[in-house]
Amino acid sequence: MERTVIESRISGAATFRIGKRFTFDAAHHLPSLPTDHKCSRVHGHTYTVEFVLEASELAGPGFVTDFGDLAVAGRYLAESFDHRDLNEVLDVEPTSEALAQHLARWFRAEVEPGVHGRLVAVRVSETPRSWAEYLLGESR
Ligand SMILES: [Zn+2]
C-alpha cells in the first residue's frame, strides 16, 4: 500500500510550490451582519495576502517563478488597497474570502500570463490566527 503511494508520486503527481506574502493595512465593515456583530462596525486590519504558485517542472535556474516577478502583486496591493476602505474598493462585501477571490482573478489576468508558475491559491488573513483561501481548480 505504502509502495503504491510512493510510486504514484514519483510517476508524475509531484509538483513544486512556492508562496509570496504581502501585507497592507485597510478598513472594512460587513454591513449585512446584524448591528450587534462587531464586524458590522468600521474597523481595520493588517491584512496578509499570500499568492501560491506551482509547477511540475522548474524554469530558469530552478524556479517555479522568480519571486521578483511577483513584486507587481505587492505594488497592486499597495496602490489599490493599502490605507483604503475595502468597502469602497471592492464591489462585493469585503470578507477575506471575497478579497482572496478578487485577488486571484486579478493575478490570473495580470500576472500569470507572464510567469512560469500557475496560481493555485490566494490566502488572506485578517489576524495571525485566521485565514481564508480561494483555491483554483484544475479546470478553469
Ligand atoms: Zn474585519
Image (spheres, grey):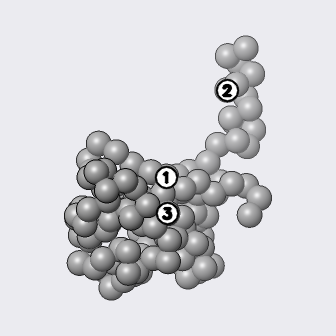
In-front residue for pair 119/30? 30
Residue 87 x %, y %: 38, 74
Counting residues from the N terminus, which is met first, the one under dot 1 or under dot 2? 2
Name the quadrant containing residue 113.
bottom right
Q: Residues within 10 Å of mark 3 (few under 14, many from 20)?
A: some
Query: Which residue appears at 75% of the width and 38% of the height?
Result: 11
| Mark in the foreground, 1 or 3 | 3
- Residue type marked 2: Ile
Measuring 31% from the left and 50% from the top, which residue is drawn there? 37
Q: Nearest to the eye among marks 2 and 3: give it.
A: 3
Q: Amino acid at mark 1?
A: Glu
Q: CA distance from mark 2 to mark 3?
A: 37 Å
As drawn, the residue found furthest toward the bottom would be 79
- Which residue is under mark 2? 6
Q: Position of residue 107 (x, y in %)?
A: 53, 74
Which one is earlier in the sequence, the residue at label 2 or at label 3?
2
**Residue at mark 2: C-beta within 8 A of ligand 1:** no
Which comes sooner in the sequence, label 1 or label 3?
Answer: 3
> Is residue 128 something one can see in this rendering?
yes
Q: Tell me: 68 left or right of 98.
A: left
Q: How dense is the environment of label 1, judged by Cα within 10 Å: few (below 14), some, or many (20 and up)?
A: many
Callout 1–callout 3 Cβ contact below 8 Å = no
Q: Position of residue 126 (x, y in %)?
A: 31, 55
Q: Residue flagged by tag 3: what amino acid is it? A: Ala
- For disc 3, the marked residue is 98
The residue identified by callout 1 is 133
Classify residue 94 as left or right of residue 53.
left
**In the shown orientation, is residue 3 left or right of residue 105?**
right
Residue 72: quadrant of the picture = bottom left
